[in-house]
Amino acid sequence: MLRGMTTVTFYAQDLEVAKDWYAEFLGTPPYFAVPGYYEFRVGDYEHEFGLIDHAYRPERAAPGPGGAIVYWHVDDLQATYDRLLELGATEYDPITTRGPGFVTASVVDPFGNVLGIMSNVHFLEILGRK
């Protein structure tokens, strides 16, 4: 049974550039580093966001962006989306209202990974109970 997200990992051919890019976007340096891997703590629950050297990418991974999208709740969807584009990400899916209290967007980072962002009323309800 799924209990909760633990770590999301993205791959990058130039790991150092990716580390610096995400440190700039997230506003914090990685808290953990070993050769070929950096990890950041992200958000209210300090979820783990990892960057892995592309050399460790699974052989069966499809080329290019795609697959599952993890959406991260953000307080200001438009500002976050604009900031990602300013930093060099490209649009994958535009800002789209999915239903009352649910608005999503996604970008492809400069390293070929899809990053989802979202305004999510359920996240705020759960956060309010903590």
Image: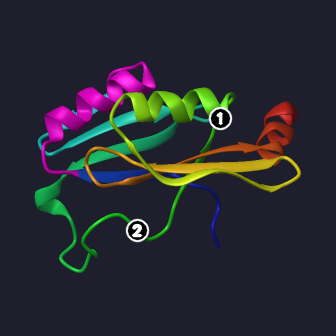
Q: Which mark is residue 58?
A: none
Q: Which mark is residue 66?
A: 2
Q: Quadrant of the C terminus?
A: top right
Query: Which residue sits at x=44%, y=71%?
Result: 67
- Contact (CB < 8 A) between labels 1 and 2? no
Q: How is the image coloured?
A: rainbow
Closer-to-camera residue (19/4): 19
Of helix, strand and loop, which one carries label 1?
Answer: helix
Estimate how packed mark 1 is, as few (under 14), some (14 to 19) or many (20 or more) residues with alpha carbons within 10 Å: some
In the image, residue 22 lies in the stretch drawn in magenta: yes
Closer-to-camera residue (70/42): 70
Q: Amino acid at mark 2?
A: Gly
Q: Amino acid at mark 1?
A: Leu
In the image, residue 65 lies in the stretch drawn in magenta: no
Task: Kindly report the distance in space between the C-alpha atoms of the residues bearing marks 1 and 2.
Answer: 21 Å
- Quadrant of the image occupied by residue 124: top right
Of helix, strand and loop, which one carries label 2?
Answer: loop
Residue 43: where, in percent of width, then height? Answer: 58, 32
Residue 48: where, in percent of width, then height? Answer: 45, 42
**Which segment did they paint magenta?**
12-30
- Quadrant of the image occupied by residue 80: top right
Q: Which residue is mark 1?
A: 77
Marked residue nearer the N-terminal end (1 or 2): 2
Query: Which residue sits at x=79%, y=35%?
Result: 127
Would residue 118 appear left or right of 15 to someone viewing this image?
right
Query: Which residue sits at x=35%, y=63%?
Result: 65
Estimate how packed mark 2 is, as few (under 14), some (14 to 19) or many (20 or more) residues with alpha carbons within 10 Å: few
- Quadrant of the image occupied by residue 45: top right
Would residue 123 appear left or right of 42 to someone viewing this image?
right
Q: Quadrant of the N terminus?
A: bottom right
